[in-house]
Image (cartoon, grey):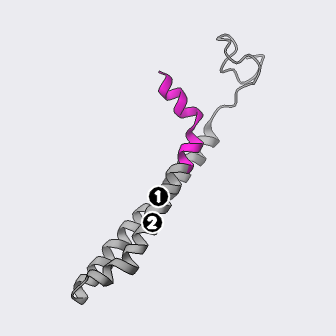
Amino acid sequence: MGTGRWVKEHVRFLGIVATILSGIGAVAGLFIILVRVPALADTKLEELLGTLLGAAVSLLFVVLALLINLTIMVYGATRRPTIAVGWGDPKVEGRTSPGV
């Protein structure tokens, strides 16, 4: 039970970390395309296929980062605001206004 609450409290931070890791993966894919593929390829066909594969992997990391950002934006837009008074009180917690 405590894990779900912890994740809900830290979803923004976790999303930023996942986006940064996705960016690192995309940059690593570009490094492989620009440096490693030409050094290891023996024929033009191997170089072409390696470049296409590296570009596909880099684009997958970019799409992953965009989906994570979209998820964070939707989560932030759909969260119900809660009042600051009465945290921890089971009768008041989760209400959107004092009169409800």
Task: Give the main secondary structure of the magenta stretch.
Answer: helix
Indicate whether 76 appears above or below 18. above
**The one of 96 and 12 positioned closer to us in this rendering:** 12
* Closer to us: 42 or 19: 42
Report the quarter where the C terminus lies: top right
- Marks 1 and 2 close (CB-CB < 8 Å): yes
Residue type at mark 2? Ala
Q: Is residue 53 left or right of residue 17?
A: left
| Residue 63 percent across, percent down from the top left | 46, 61
Q: For the magenta stretch, what is the residue range?
A: 1-16
Image spot of residue 57 (x, y percent): 36, 66
What residue would you read off at disc 1? Answer: 22
Residue 11 higher or lower than 46, as above or below: above
**On screen, residue 47 above or below 19:** below
Q: Which residue is mark 2?
A: 26
Amino acid type, label 1: Ser
Q: Name the residue rendered at 28%, 83% in the picture.
A: 47
Quarter of the rendering containing residue 79 = top right
